[in-house]
Amino acid sequence: MKLPHRRKFLHLTVGAAALPVVSRVAWAQAYPTRPVTMVVGFAAGGGADVIARTIAERMRVSLGQRVLIENVTGASGGIGVGRVARAAADGYTLSVGSLTTHVFNGAAYPLQYDVVKDFEPIALGPLHPLLIVAKKSMPADDLKGLVAWLKNNPDKASAGTSGVASVQHLAAIDFQNKTGTRFAIVPYRGGVLAIQDLLAQQIDLIFATTPDSIEQARAGNIKAYAVTAKSRLGAAPDIPTVDEAGLSGFYVSNWNALFAPKGTPSSIIAKLNQAVVDALGDAAVRRRLADLGEELPPREQQAPEALRGLQRAEIEKWWPIIKAAGIKGE
């Protein structure tokens, strides 16, 4: 006599347990119902910030909600990334990541999060090589002359970076190793701040991201010696490649990408990925990014799984270099 009651009880229990799952699916399908925040770990006006704002404006069209940018600086972008790692996995707080924040920092800083395990990849965005630039009063007129001047003036020059373990920092170390030069490396809380001091001639050179430096280089406000890539930039065709300038094979490229906190529903990841893909396919966005010296990855490389593969490959390449150099953030 008690069996039917037990079956009824079990049926109700299973139904109740399923309610949160159904509710979660419905909630994910309705996403987004309010503005989305993208956290940039570097200063406003810098390369990562400009790229994020350019893409965010177009993502608003696909998502039907505003996409806000919040700048949270410090620890080479790590403070901002940490905030996203601790955020709810609901698609409303995202990380504008880069080679620095989601690769280098994992080897250089004692993080309270894992750069791979604590994030869901969304989409790979623009990629860009660096520009080797110096203050306007630098005596050298070309890259070979810069190397010669640095060799003749050991430890007298200073190179700005966007922070410890940033792409500018590692490029500077690699440059020293390859050229036998020595100079101080000065970390800033963002690349744009370093550029400001370069313009003020408070520092001597920067291995700068193109968004941070290309407009100043084109205007002649700083000296641009080479682009760290195999081909010249369409946005600055007068700047030679490192191969042409006499430092063959010195290739360094940064990238930007979007990540969500671990556990974000796959349907939300898919919506966000499509919004990024739509943005990167927009003619106005493409023109703006090209003007900044950015290159866009092929469509197949914009998928979440492709971004995860790139991140893992970069970790395998760079972590041993960082550890060998003894780079430690604080």
Image (tube, helix red, strand yellow):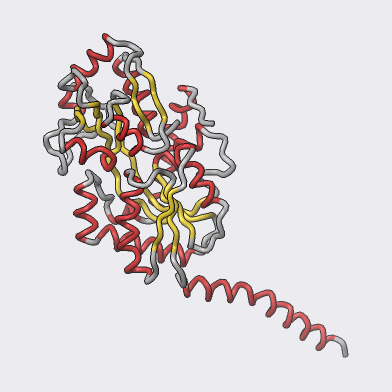
Residue beneath the point at 48% across and 62% down: 92
Q: Residue at x 22, y 19 (%)?
A: 146
Q: Residue 99, relative to residue 247: is it above or below?
A: below
- Relative to 85, does residue 162 appear above or below in the rendering? above
Q: Where residue 296 appears, x then y in whole percent?
A: 26, 50
Nearer to us in this view, 93 or 128? 93
Residue at the farthest front position: 200
Direction from residue 322 to residue 153 in the image, left or right: left
Residues 307 and 210: in front is 210
Q: Quadrant of residue 285?
A: bottom left
Residue that protrudes farthest toward the top in the picture:
152
Residue in the picture at 19% in, 28% down? 223
Q: Residue furthest right?
A: 1
The total number of labels drawn is: 0
Where's residue 139, x and y in %? 19, 18
Furthest-left residue in this view: 238
Q: Position of residue 233 (x, y in %)?
A: 17, 40
Tell whether 106 sits left or right of 213: right
257 relative to 291 in the view: left or right: right
Q: Please identify the quadrant where the C terminus is shown.
A: top right
**In the image, is 225 to the left or to the right of 88?**
left
Query: Residue 148's spot in the image, x, y percent?
Result: 22, 13
Occupied quadrant, residue 35:
bottom left
Residue at the spot 49% in from the left edge and 37% down from the top edge? 75
Q: State which quarter of the image contains the N terminus.
A: bottom right
Q: Is residue 36 above or below residue 226?
A: below
